[in-house]
Amino acid sequence: MYMEHEQEEEQEHTDSDGMDSDDPLTCTDTKYGKSFRHFTREALPRLDNYRNVLSLHAAPRPTLDELHNASLSRKPQMVEKDLATPTLTSTNLKFGWIKGVLMRCLLNIWGVMLFLRLSWVVGQAGVAQSMLLILTTSVVTTITALSMSAISTNGVIKGGGTYYMISRSLGPEFGGSIGLIFSMANAVACAMYVVGFGESLITLIPETAYMVDKGWDQAIYGCITIVLLTGIVIVGMEWEAKAQIVLLVILLAAIADFCIGSIIGPKSDVEMAQGFVGYNWTVLQENIGPDYRRFEEVDYNFFSVFAIFFPAATGILAGANISGDLKDPQKSIPKGTLLAILLTTISYLVIAVIAGWTVLRDASGDVADIANWTMANCAATDSCAYGLHNSNDVIRLVSGFGPLIYGGCFAATLSSALASLVSAPKVFQALCQDKLYPYLEFFAKGYGPNNEPVRGYVLTFVIAVAFILMGGLNQIAPLISNFFLAAYALINFSTFHASLAKPVGWRPTFRFYNMWLSLVGSLLCVAIMFVISWITALVTFGFLLTLYLLVSYRKPDVNWGSTTQAQTYKAALTGVYHLNTVTEHVKNYRPQILVLTGFPGERPILTDFTYLLTKGHSLMLCGHIIQGQVSHRGREALTSRAYQWFKGRKIKAFYSVVDDVGFKEGASALVQ
């Protein structure tokens, strides 16, 4: 138990129950790592005490004397280190689980699709399949959230969110690949939300007031909007958080307005002519089944509609992506994310049922058709301008107070755009700080007390503007769906792989996960990717593979204790156990050679001759006997040089040093 004297006094006098502190950086009990079976008051181990002794961050372990008399024997360099260590102050803004995770996830999930595409989804898929579609997305996101919660409660979560969790779990190759793709996905998602904002804004402007035409005006308004949003996030996280609160209030009011309006019913014959007839069993029976049609030159089916809607559920990582700005990520991420998924799923189901129960699929908008209930006859001539199939304005039509729906739509799109605009640079900054890819260190620099990635904000702005000018919602949404599904697949696979490898460090305090459920979630994400668009899925995996191979080729000098390392060790150990029970046969004979080369580079001919016999398919051990004593640092240096020499000559062998013995004793030790 490694505990400083000052920590003991603080526990005795100011923290008698060990539960008062909410700061994970200063808490010394097991509040952040306890389970019902192991509830102790031991101090959490210090990571620095377990580092390699050659590490710059290594810390000396205290002796028993130092633990009992810390005030007398405390090393002066430790005092200097403590004095130089920055502490959290009021300038370092940290969020709790409500403001930091729940609100961000709600605002990011309730995006542009809620107001502009959910009614269209009901028109295409019908009420029954729409509910199935919503529940399918919820199953994917819930499994992913459970897997993410397990990873996030397995240790300290720093800045970088999704990238940090995957890279520290599966290693830099997987983490670097998904980090870059996830940053790109968030940047493109920001563009999608801004395009949705422009699409809703353009409906308020008469055609005579267009600056150019509908498409270009929508892009112009989108570019102006992204400039303003970028300015807000550059000012700082505190202003961005305040803006999110205002937007959430408006959004909740708009959803309530829609529900109340459906109860009130149509307020005029014009609304009824446009398809809003109030709660009607006949309408519900007609809308219960699917009616897939051609829209914008595309023949839609369940999976293509799913691809359009899926981005509406992709905001579950909004809280995890700012993990570095959370007070207690281990508690905040699971609680806030799962509650957000529950609330948004219920809201989507309610809105889908209300839309299918109260609005016709097709309506002419002609008041004269009301008397004979022939508003939907225009479908025969494909001339309907209103209804679930034809209008994106259904939510406003049903509402009790139309302008509030516009406010809610603006709030949903802008809040989601803000969340994506913050998430993309934060994840990208963490990726750049790890130096996994060349020429990206420029974006690692942060500014201000919260280490804001201003350069990343500018890059995200450029990418968002490019996609705003490229296309509409239905063109951008499938691409984003594939990127997010790839990220979700790797998050689920990370949890499965960690549970399978069972490294000592895999002990998440979040217990409501299952390794096989995580595997099913990962396979489900991959399957949905290919069903949505096999071409886009292949491109996504090709891009992932390219990034993976790039990081593998560069071999970054990082050691994060990934589960791939644990699995390699476990597989080797299992193989050795298996060989222990196998009787050797002459057909499987392989030489196992101990060659006393000293340092291999000093006797290259002997080393090369031995390798001619083993050829990398048999055991070759190069022994080095040193009569004098060698320090640990010297041993590490010799070993490193030897393996570098092996690598240069493409030799597969082991190197072992025996020191402080004579040649006879050393050779005997190596043979044994």
Image: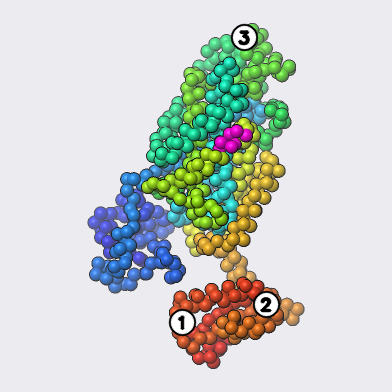
Contact (CB < 8 A) between labels 3 and 2?
no
Is the stretch drawn in magenta largely helix, strand or loop? helix
Q: Is residue 468 magenta?
A: yes
Q: Give the vertical position of 94 relative to 368 (above or below).
A: below
- Residue type (three-letter) at the residue carrying disc 1: Val
Of residues 276 and 366, the one nearer the viewer is 366
> Horizontal placement of 15 versus 283: left or right?
left
Q: CA distance from mark 1 to mark 2?
A: 29 Å
Q: Which mark is residue 367?
A: 3
Q: State yes or no: residue 627 in magenta.
A: no
> Dot 1, crowdedness within 10 Å: few (<14), some or many (≥20)?
some
Give the image quarter of residue 592.
bottom right
In the rendered view, would you say 442 is above or below 61?
Answer: above
Q: Earlier in the sequence, mark 1 or mark 2?
A: 2
The residue labelled by disc 2 is 618
Q: Which element is circle 3 on?
A: helix
Instruction: Specify the segment rendered in magenta.
Output: 464-470
Quarter occupied by the N terminus: bottom left
Quadrant for residue 478, please give it.
Answer: top right
Question: For mark 1, what is the residue?
Answer: 630
Q: Residue at 55% of width from left, 45% of height from top?
A: 183
Query: Which residue lies at the image location 34% right of the left edge and 57% below the top edge?
Result: 85
Q: Is residue 141 above or below residue 394?
A: below
Please say if the residues under marks 1 and 2 sit with CB atoms less than 8 Å apart: no
